[in-house]
Amino acid sequence: MLKLHGECWVITDMAAGNQRQALALAEQLQMPFRHLVLEPRAPWSWLAPRLTIGGTLALPVDQRAVFAPPWPSVAIGCGRAAALFTRMLRRLSAGQCHTVQILDPRIDPAHWDTVIAPRHDRVDGANVLQPLGSLNSVDDAWLADGRESCPHFAELPQPRVGVLLGGPRQGIALDADYARQLAGRLLDRWRHEGGSLLVLASRRTPATLIEIFRQALQKVPGLVWAGHDDGRNPYPGVLGWADRLVVTPDSVNMLSEACAVGCPVQTFVTMPLPTKIERFHHALRSAGLLQDIDDVAALKHTPPLRETGAIAGILRKGIESRNQG
């Protein structure tokens, strides 16, 4: 495999999910990279990535020094704000920078060299790559590192069930009633089969939901982690040791990472999902990667969903072909 020359810029906003996708892809390209966290000002922030007039004036003064020549050989952006800067780099570098945008940029993908958008986004174009889920770093080595970082989880009774909590979003109400229903199902299953429950909240999980799980599961072996007050984030360890994962239905990133582990993955849906999320769930179910929490008989191990390496390989070939042309 030829080494790609030059530097890669990874451009994101502060959103953890965007950062995880872009950094995972950059690591697979195996070239030096810098991570730029850029937040455009209004009105560019309102209209990104459509409004490019004004160039670097879109950035606050303290961020302009990092978005400056020499321009990178490759730029990977994730999220709508980053799409503004990856689009600009194509012009600023006189076409010498291979621009990659992850997620639907909501305008013609031809403004970038490569667009990576999951199938449920239904973005079409000759330069569009369509993975089933979101990009991530979960593979055998990552999971082994996770187990090594949390060796005490090995002492927990099996099955060890990891529970990943997201938060409400448009069209998905993860409220107190939802939390009580989910906690009730987890408790019923635990009383039947034993084991332990490892519950992880995200930044989007409301405090009310976290407290419901703390109260409901206080007699169950395991943990409820909701932030640094509960110690170091054990997320890699939970995925590494999990015999089964239960994931709320709201997050494409969480579901994709759970499906990359290789253990059974379940979700709990109480109402119709928004159209795009429903398409994603349907694709996972069709591939045998996702089951309902009540489908006990359907539990099965399937080949893990690991697409980042393959996407990086296609991208690398495109970059090499362009450099040789």
Image (cartoon, rainbow, N blue to C red):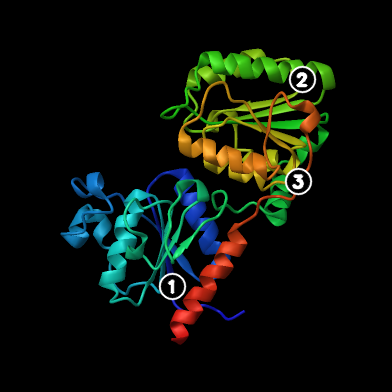
Of badges 3 and 2, the one in the foreground is: 3
Direction from residue 118 to residue 296 in the image, left or right: right
Give neighbour class at mark 2: few <14, some 14-19, many 20+ (Cα, 10 Å): some
Left or right of 185, for residue 297: right
Q: Is residue 123 visible?
A: yes
N-term-proximal mark, 1 vs 2: 1
At 84% from the left edge and 22% from the top edge, which residue is drawn?
A: 193
Image: 89 above or below 153: below
Pointer 1 residue: 7
Occupied quadrant, residue 189: top right
Residue identifier under label 3: 302
Secondary structure of the residue carrying numbered label 1: loop
Residue linked to disc 2: 189
| Quarter of the figure with residue 57 | bottom left
Looking at the rendered image, the disc whose residue lies closer to the viewer, 3 or 1, is 3
Nearer-N-terminus badge (3/2) = 2
Q: Tell me how far mark 3 sits from mark 2, CA to CA.
A: 22 Å
Considering depth in this image, is 221 or 100 the residue closer to the camera? 100
Q: Mark number for residue 18?
A: none
The residue depicted at 50 percent of the width and 27 percent of the height is 205
Q: Give me the C-alpha separation between circle 3 and circle 1.
A: 37 Å
Residue 90 lies, in percent from the top left, at 31, 69
The three-letter amino acid code for the residue at tag 1 is Glu
Disc 2 is placed on an element classified as: helix
User: What type is the residue that disc 3 sits on?
Assistant: Thr
Of residues 131 and 66, which is closer to you in this image? 131
**How many circles with numbers are drawn on the protein?**
3
